[in-house]
Amino acid sequence: MSLEDDLESLISVGETSNYKNVVAKHPSGWEPGVAWNGETGTLTSQPLESEPNDWSELLAVWDLDPTIFEVIEPVQFRAWDANTGAGVLKRLYYYRASIRRRVESRKSVDELLAVIGKKVPKKPPVATGEGFVYCVPAGDLQLGKPDGDGTEGTIARFLTKTDLAVTRLKELRKIGREVDSIMLPWLGDCIEGLVSQGGALAAAGRLDLTLTEQLRVYRRLMLHQIQQFAPLASKIIVPVVPGNHDEVQRVGKIQRRYDDSWAIEGAVAVADALKLIPGYEHVSFVFPGFDELTITLDVGGTAVGFAHGHQFGRDPVKWWSGQAHGMQDIGSATLLLGAHLHHLRIEQGGAKTFIQIPALDGGSTWWKHKTGQDSPAGMMSLLIGHGGWKDLVLL
């Protein structure tokens, strides 16, 4: 044994504690990193000593190109007093943000709307009072929804189907169908809105239009449709009912008022505008009453009810039966037009018929992942009157 070994042995105190106090490097749940699903995700920053000058600095920490990715506000933050050693504490800040891939193909709203154009109304034909009402319902455009071909695809589809609906009316007249009036029902969820799924879609950045942009597109599509049909009949009726996506405000599952709807407000704006334009005096709008969701009208001798469908879900006939039992106006209708579930459905029982119209949006990625199914987008038209309906086609 060397002198050095003897010295080490002589000065040793024996066993010492082998426990080390492990100081957390980051607050629980705020560990830096990126969770990414291919299009969207969540970023948690490394600890920073001050707020970033720009949110793109958060992206730079993880080498995410700000020309390809973007931060979605609001951004959460957490202050953390970190032990930097020797008992020194330093306050650091963590930032958590939702991120998404920039939609490179998205065009400006003005460019999307430029295809709508303008049309000068012509004098409509004189009605005989004995004809049918030509009905072209629209619903579930969910403008602002990026799924499938997004808002751009929905706009193109609506314009194309509207042209086909005009052509179909001319075909019906050629084969001898007498049409006096045109009805253009809007059956709700025509914008994606901000309240569905508790606002999660907006928070996650799954919208390709802001709320004001959604409303602007909705109004202009409605105006375009009316412009196309105005010269073709002496009476144009536009019934508009609220959906669940276009609710203005929702607390939990409760609305302040059921008729407080962006769908209603957008249509009222169109109605107000048409009052100022010569040549549209024969166009009228119908809305639900105070705190109501539905409309019931006498359409050429046929009682017709209009509802979005979120109030009756997957069993419209049961709901409709309850309305009849409760002596509600819509319960006396013999034809009920609804939307909401995004696919064509026709169900007859006795003198009553329920028709659920197809959606016009680009589909639902969530529903496809959950069930493997897609609902074909489309628009339909039919004749209503003389106590019934006929000549229904998918356009």
Image: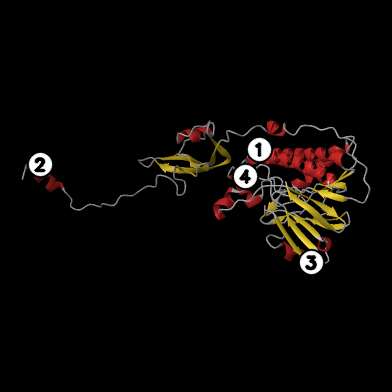
Quadrant assignment for the N terminus: top left
Between label 2 and label 4, give the one nearer the viewer.
4
In the rendered structure, which amino acid carries the disc numbered 4?
Ala
Q: Name the residue under label 1.
A: 152
Question: Between disc 4 and disc 1, whose residue precedes?
Answer: 1
Q: Name the residue under label 4.
A: 202
Residue 151 image position (x, y, % from top left)? 66, 40
Give the alpha-carbon distance from disc 2 to disc 4, as whole Å: 72 Å
Give the alpha-carbon distance from disc 2 to disc 1, as whole Å: 83 Å
The one nearer the camera, 177 or 77, is 177
In the rendered structure, which amino acid carries the disc numbered 3?
Gly
Residue 185 image position (x, y, % from top left)? 79, 49
**How many residues crowd around disc 2 within 10 Å: few (fewer than 14), some, or many (20 or more)?**
few
In the displayed structure, does residue 48 sit left or right of residue 152? left
Tag 2 secondary structure: helix
Q: Mark 2 points at which residue?
A: 4
Tag 4 secondary structure: helix
Residue 54 image position (x, y, % from top left)? 54, 32
Tag 3 secondary structure: loop
Residue at 74%, 34% in the rendered image: 116
Q: In this view, does 235 lie above or below 298?
A: above
Between label 2 and label 3, give the one nearer the viewer.
3
Question: Badges 2 and 4: C-beta atoms under 8 Å apart?
Answer: no
Give the alpha-carbon distance from disc 4 to disc 1, as whole Å: 18 Å
Give the alpha-carbon distance from disc 3 to disc 4, as whole Å: 44 Å
